[in-house]
Amino acid sequence: MFTIFACGFRPRCALEIDDGSQTRIDKIYDIIGESRYGIHDLSRTELDQDNNLPRFNMPMELGIFLGAKRYGDDEQKTKRCLILDIERYRFQRFISDIAGMDIRAHGGDAEQVVRRVRDWLANVSRRKLPGPALLVGAWTAFLHDKPVMAELAGLEADDIPFADLEALIVGWLAK
């Protein structure tokens, strides 16, 4: 989220809309339909302790995004996405149907995620964006300030609702 805001874009997430009358999947359909860019991180495939199964929400959301691009109208066909994973070819063990796509590895390192997202946004948007080292430094400074900002806002630093986190990031970047 931080990198996306710092690059002048707005991240979208089903958690941004708190509407109990709308299903999560309908929120995802709407957001994907409205978004030109998509970032999908396939790295979270660890097994859940309760049922010993992985959660595959991100691969499903990637599939919806790719389907919108493939079968949508002319505007949908202009969609672009970044696909991330811990290792470049690891995804082939659990979602081999996307073999041949350019997956970007981040090695589980958050700084690499910042760099990969920034570089991709610069490429697809052709905007002049802050350099990767500058963004990593800003992100590190934000993480340092986040607990104090959360406390001042009456929030738990490790459990900040999406809208509140958005406000903290945008406010911090404005300074």
Image (spheres, rainbow, N blue to C red):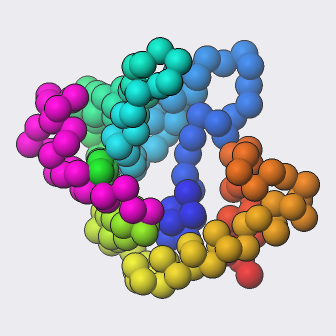
Q: Is residue 137 above or below residue 33?
A: below
Which quarter shows the C terminus?
A: bottom right
Residue 74 picture quarter:
top left
> Residue 105: percent from the left, percent from the top?
26, 56
**Is residue 160 shown left or right of residue 109?**
right
> Residue 78: percent from the left, percent from the top?
29, 46
| Residue range highlighted in magenta | 87-110
Q: Is residue 64 above or below residue 130?
A: above
What residue sits 84% from the left and 52% below the top?
A: 155
> Residue 26: percent from the left, percent from the top?
55, 21
Give the camera-side residue of 72 and 173: 173
Residue 64 picture quarter:
top left
What residue sits 23% from the left and 51% below the top?
A: 87
What residue sits 91% from the left and 55% below the top?
A: 154
Give the camera-side residue of 5 and 54: 54
> Residue 68: percent from the left, percent from the top?
33, 30
